[in-house]
Amino acid sequence: MNDVPAGICRGVSRVYQAADSYVQALDHVDAEFRPGMMTALVGPSGSGKSSLLRILSGLDRPSYGSVEVGGVKLSDMRAAARRRARKRLVGYVFQRPSENLISYLNLRDHMTLAAQMRGGVPKDEIAEVLDLLGIGALAGHRPEELSGGEQQRLAFAQAAVGAPPILVADEPTAELDHASAAALLEVVGHIAKRGTAVIFATHDPVVAERADETIRLESGRRVG
């Protein structure tokens, strides 16, 4: 397995201004995420899990500290440059399936669009990812014709196409029953084995147990 981290956070802090005060969402967090590994971010609501995911994925910049993904220092980039880098380096899965998918596009269209955003991906790789996630036979289906679990599989498929260094997911199983969540995490493990570092936030200890590593946050600090 490649020992070079796919993602690195060093002293990452994030401070938000709220009305007349400031809120410290993250406080000097250090972390490394390795290819082929699934990492669970755990902790109570407000502990900083989503903030760390957004910074790691390049959606936000840290107030202090540095973030590197695939050898590229995202924390040094302005917004436009981060957007370009994010398309190439990061797959992102939101909690609600509807936030990941476009209602009028079928599964094949979603994958084609995702491949184009990643800079072009061979058709056989697209087919491989779909088969890996067990939805290769649903290419002509739109989101409304898929179950919740199938929608999240599609979300992971389009995030994983092109094998980005990291794939982050914010509570990806929150709207699934336990059986669907377990099945999803099983196939997501196959994505990781292809060399992508998968990082997901979760409140579910059963889901967290499926991860190779666990990072615990409390009040914005890493405590485990």
Image (cartoon, grey):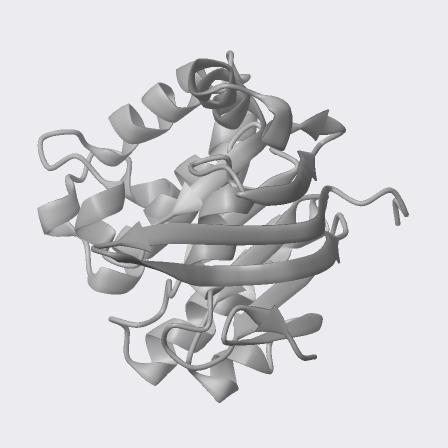
Question: Does residue 95 appear anywhere in the picture?
Answer: yes
- What residue is rendered at 37% in x and 62% in y? 172
Q: Nearer the viewer, residue 133 or 137?
A: 133
Q: Residue furthest bottom?
A: 205
- What residue is rendered at 42% in x and 14% in y? 116
From the viewer's perspective, is 134 left or right of 216? left
- Residue 5 percent coordinates (x, y): 80, 45
- Residue 67 percent coordinates (x, y): 66, 40
Question: Does residue 132 appear anywhere in the picture?
Answer: no
Which quarter of the picture shows residue 88?
top right
- What residue is rendered at 35% in x and 46% in y? 155
Q: Nearer the viewer, residue 99 or 124?
A: 99
Q: Nearer the viewer, residue 100 or 64?
A: 64
On screen, 40 above or below 145? Answer: below
- What residue is rendered at 48% in x and 16% in y? 84
Which quarter of the picture shows residue 114?
top left
From the viewer's perspective, is 163 left or right of 144? right
On screen, 13 above or below 89? Answer: below
Q: Quadrant of the C terminus?
A: bottom right
Which quarter of the picture shows residue 177?
bottom left
Q: Residue furthest front?
A: 20
Q: How many marks?
A: 0
- Residue 218 percent coordinates (x, y): 53, 78
- Residue 51 percent coordinates (x, y): 44, 55
